Image: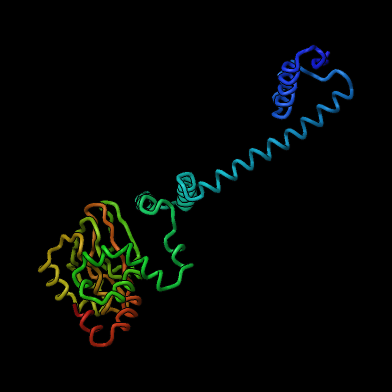
């Protein structure tokens, strides 16, 4: 019944053979060709088992290839976001916090396309890390007047210490009484500053500095944009208690410079320049 290779046409023989092999390997089996004898049945069972394993391995290898090549792509990012959603849902995180987290992840992914800049820099020599950080972040220095006259090596160290942050519109960046040991430099966007009417939430340093802080914002205004900085009061405070409330009025991109990093950079400058820089 299956003696198709003695019909005088080799084309038909190969076509029918290929059809049989393909349908068997893929475990489809249309039924137009089926085993008749016992030996044919045993043979087809062996082919089916071999084909199933082969196809499963082939599909798995192809899936692994796609996964490896898309480990930093959109699919990987979506999986990361979905994992975050599941975690925050399980922990009952408030919606407004979830929205800020998702916004931050989407913003950073658009900027870096999934590349972890910190991890990439960590494997490089420190001088090269400084050079790359300077090339990536020097626009921040150009926006902040007090950074422009600094020596190039100091500017590179500052760039390397800057940590990017982003906030959506109407987000509270920090409130009076929050703890923070970073100075924030605005790169884009607009924020508003509100000073406390009740000084009881401030620490000793904040209370003594309240008049000076008020004088500062009366001079520069309470609406700040690119080139302005916030939170420098942490330099004179051991507790780090914030002395004002800052709210984003648009999408705001800023960079944070920690007190410890700034002190380390200033020590590198020498005592006289350190004092001059901190006073400025």
At x 85%, y 23%, the residue is 40
Query: Does residue 151 appear in the picture of this structure?
Result: yes
Q: Is residue 195 above or below residue 53?
A: below
For this rendering, which residue is in front, 259 or 95?
259
For this rendering, which residue is in front, 148 or 161?
148
Total of numbered circles in the picture?
Answer: 0
Q: Is residue 75 above or below residue 18?
A: below
At x 40%, y 69%, the residue is 129
Furthest residue in direction bottom, as rendered: 271
Residue 116 is left or right of residue 196, and the answer is right
Placement of the C terminus among the 4 image quadrants: bottom left
Colour basis:
rainbow
Query: Does residue 181 appear in the picture of this structure?
Result: no
Q: Position of residue 145 (x, y in %)?
A: 18, 69
For this rendering, which residue is in front, 92 or 162?
162
Q: Is residue 22 above or below residue 261?
A: above
Residue 225 is left or right of residue 91, and the answer is left
Q: Position of residue 121 (x, y in %)?
A: 44, 65
Q: Position of residue 1 (x, y in %)?
A: 83, 13
Residue 131 is left or right of residue 67, and the answer is left
Furthest residue in direction right, as rendered: 38
Q: Position of residue 108 (x, y in %)?
A: 37, 54
């Amino acid at each position: 019944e299956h003696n198709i290779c003695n019909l005088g046409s080799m084309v038909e023989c190969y076509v029918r053979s290929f059809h049989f092999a393909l349908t068997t390997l893929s475990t489809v089996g249309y039924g137009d060709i089926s085993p008749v004898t016992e030996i044919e049945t045993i043979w087809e069972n062996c082919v089916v088992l071999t084909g199933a394993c082969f196809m499963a391995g082939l599909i798995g290898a192809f899936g692994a290839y796609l996964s490896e090549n898309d480990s930093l792509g959109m699919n990987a990012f979506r999986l990361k976001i979905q994992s975050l959603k599941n975690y925050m849902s399980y922990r009952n995180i408030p919606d407004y916090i979830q929205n800020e987290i998702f916004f931050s992840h989407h913003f950073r992914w658009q900027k870096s396309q999934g590349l972890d800049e910190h991890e990439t820099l960590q494997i490089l020599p420190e001088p090269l890390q400084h050079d790359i950080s300077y090339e990536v972040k020097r626009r921040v220095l150009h926006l902040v007047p007090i950074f422009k006259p600094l020596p190039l090596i100091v500017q590179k160290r500052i760039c390397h210490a800057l940590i990017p942050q982003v906030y959506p519109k109407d987000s509270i960046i920090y409130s009076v009484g929050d703890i923070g040991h970073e100075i924030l430099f605005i790169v884009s966007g607009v924020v508003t500053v509100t000073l406390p009417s009740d000084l009881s939430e401030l620490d000793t340093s904040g209370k003594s500095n309240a008049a000076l802080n008020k004088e500062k914002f009366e001079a520069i205004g309470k609406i700040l944009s690119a080139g302005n900085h916030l939170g420098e009061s942490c330099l004179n405070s051991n507790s780090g208690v914030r002395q004002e409330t800052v709210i984003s009025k648009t999408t705001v991109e800023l960079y944070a410079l920690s007190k410890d990093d700034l002190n380390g950079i200033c020590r590198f400058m020498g005592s006289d320049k350190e004092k001059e820089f901190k006073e400025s």
